[in-house]
Image: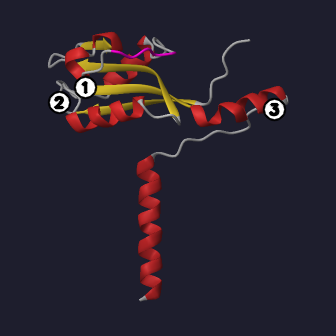
């Protein structure tokens, strides 16, 4: 039987410079050690000053991100179409870290639902920026009501 995966998300985080910032790299290293999610693919996309795109695969991350010993279950899931779309949004001289992340915590639930013949009726990702803005707005509204 094939391996059961939890839900998978693709994240592309863009930077105005050609290198991934050190703090982001540090958080990525922590994510690679996390048990609740699994990074299944990881690439860096760069746009040169003349607009040419290049892709750095995880096996070539040594100098870029100091990640040298990682095996990815879905290396290659980030395809050329993804790279082109992400690259189109980058400024010249910019870069993007692209991570495909599996929600490991959901594997058992997914397997049980699949075995029960269930189908996904809806799935929606709400970006962190939206959630944080809504929470801040709600807190500000609540504070105004108590004043």
Picture quarter containing residue 117? Answer: top right
Q: Residue 72 lies in magenta, yes or no?
A: yes
Q: Are marks 2 and 1 in contact (CB under 8 Å)?
A: yes
* Residue at 38% across, 18% down: 83
* Residue located beneath label 2 in the image: 17
Residue positioned most to the left: 49
Q: Which residues are magenta?
A: 69-73
Horizontal placement of 123 versus 36: left or right? right
Label whose residue precedes the other's in the sequence (3 or 2)? 2
Label 3: few (<14), some or many (≥20) within 10 Å?
Answer: few
SS category of the residue bearing label 1? strand
Label 2: few (<14), some or many (≥20) within 10 Å?
Answer: some
Percent x, y for residue 30?
Answer: 36, 35
Q: Are marks 3 and 2 in contact (CB under 8 Å)?
A: no
The image's mark for residue 95 is: 1
* Residue located beneath label 3 in the image: 118
């Amino acid at each position: 039987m094939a391996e059961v995966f939890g839900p998978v998300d693709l994240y592309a985080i863009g930077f105005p410079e050609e290198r991934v910032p050190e703090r982001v790299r540090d958080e990525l290293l922590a994510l690679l050690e996390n048990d609740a999610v699994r990074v299944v693919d990881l690439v860096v996309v760069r746009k040169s000053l003349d607009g040419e795109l290049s892709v750095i695969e995880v096996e070539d991350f040594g100098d870029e991100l100091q990640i040298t010993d990682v095996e990815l279950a879905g290396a290659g899931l980030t395809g050329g179409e993804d790279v082109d779309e992400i690259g189109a949004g980058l400024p010249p001289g910019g870069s993007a870290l692209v991570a495909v992340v599996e929600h490991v915590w959901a594997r058992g639930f997914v397997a049980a639902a699949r075995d029960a013949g269930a189908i996904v009726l809806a799935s929606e990702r709400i970006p962190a920026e939206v959630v944080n803005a809504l929470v801040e707005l709600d807190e500000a509204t609540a504070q105004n009501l108590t004043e």
